[in-house]
Amino acid sequence: MPLGRHVDYPREYDASLLFPIARALGRNEIGLAGAGPHDAGLPFIGSDRWHAYELGWLDGRGKPRVATATLSIPAASPHLIESKSLKLYLNSFNATRFDDDEAVRARIAADLAQVAGSAVEVVFGLPPIDEQTEMAESLDELPIAFDHYGPPQPDFLQSDADEVVEESLTSALLKSNCPVTGQPDWARVRIDYRGPRLDRAGLLRYLVSFRDHAGFHEQCVEQIFHDLMQRARPQHLSVQARYTRRGGLDINPWRATPGFAAPAAGRDLRQ
């Protein structure tokens, strides 16, 4: 596993650089149903959308080509892909010749699908920066005190069963840490739900309690989804996090109850 140790810069295309991590490992830790090898019976739908800002290769004449790309990996895939290995893999294209751009796109899609264990969508380009998260109600200016920064504390989550609402809430204060290197991962999280009204102060305290938590991006979003379902019992729930860029990549996991419409692709201002 290349994470957390020195790795030589790749000199040629090498699909073996990609490192899979079984999703079941993180799901078993939080008691998530359907954490088997094929994730049968998962309580959510979703995907992990990656934005790649540093991608290049050589054309048939040896002339450098550069691009950005959006990669979408289904949440039901058996494996997530470790981010440093994906960075190294994409860099391995830099000195390799391809006949045309489509050959590059198809090769990336095929390699990622092989490692993730399911089809992966790859398109060149990035979604626009949008104001989607700004349309939700921000929790970040609530005048409350904090003294718990880990581990994540589901007991902070409270709801009023006598008042059913449909609303969108957001916070830019989500932070967790890489479970191997300890480097910080920053994100804006958006929660859309219909169900008992969530206590906003408790929800923000809960999100801040990830601050010293060690977990991969995808696992943190699944834990937030799971804890909200267990504590608040919403009829419909969507949790999306837009993590800031590290190593030329940002990750945007989304998990929702079945039937929930996928959020429009977009990037946060910090991305």
Image (cartoon, grey):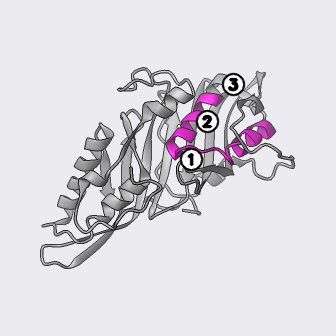
| Picture residue at 42% right of the left edge, 56% below the top | 84
Near mark 2 (Cα within 10 A), the count class, few <14, some 14-19 or many ≥20, is many
The outermost residue toward the front is 6
The residue to which callout 2 is attached is: 224
Element type at mark 2: helix
Residue 254 image offset from top left, x and y in percent: 50, 41
Instruction: Tell how many labels.
Output: 3
Inspect the image, locate mark 3, and give the three-letter code of the amino acid beneath it.
Answer: Arg
Q: Is residue 93 magenta?
A: no
Element type at mark 1: strand
Alpha carbon separation for disc pair 3 and 1: 20 Å
Q: Is residue 146 above or below residue 185?
A: above
Inspect the image, locate mark 1, and give the three-letter code of the amino acid beneath it.
Answer: Ala
- Range of magenta residues: 200-227
The residue to which callout 1 is attached is: 241
| Picture residue at 36% right of the left edge, 55% below the top | 86
Q: Is residue 220 magenta?
A: yes
Residue 87 image offset from top left, x and y in percent: 38, 60
Q: Is residue 188 left or right of residue 260?
A: right
The residue to which callout 3 is attached is: 231
Inspect the image, locate mark 2, and give the three-letter code of the amino acid beneath it.
Answer: Ile
Q: Are marks 2 and 1 in contact (CB under 8 Å)?
A: yes
| Picture residue at 47% right of the left edge, 32% below the top | 25
Q: Is residue 56 above or below residue 48?
A: below
Near mark 3 (Cα within 10 A), the count class, few <14, some 14-19 or many ≥20, is some
Quadrant position of the C terminus in the picture: bottom right
| Picture residue at 77% right of the left edge, 33% below the top | 156
Alpha carbon separation for disc pair 2 and 1: 10 Å
Tell me which label, 3 or 1, sits earlier in the chain: 3
Q: Is residue 59 above or below residue 37?
A: below
Helix, strand or loop: magenta stretch: helix
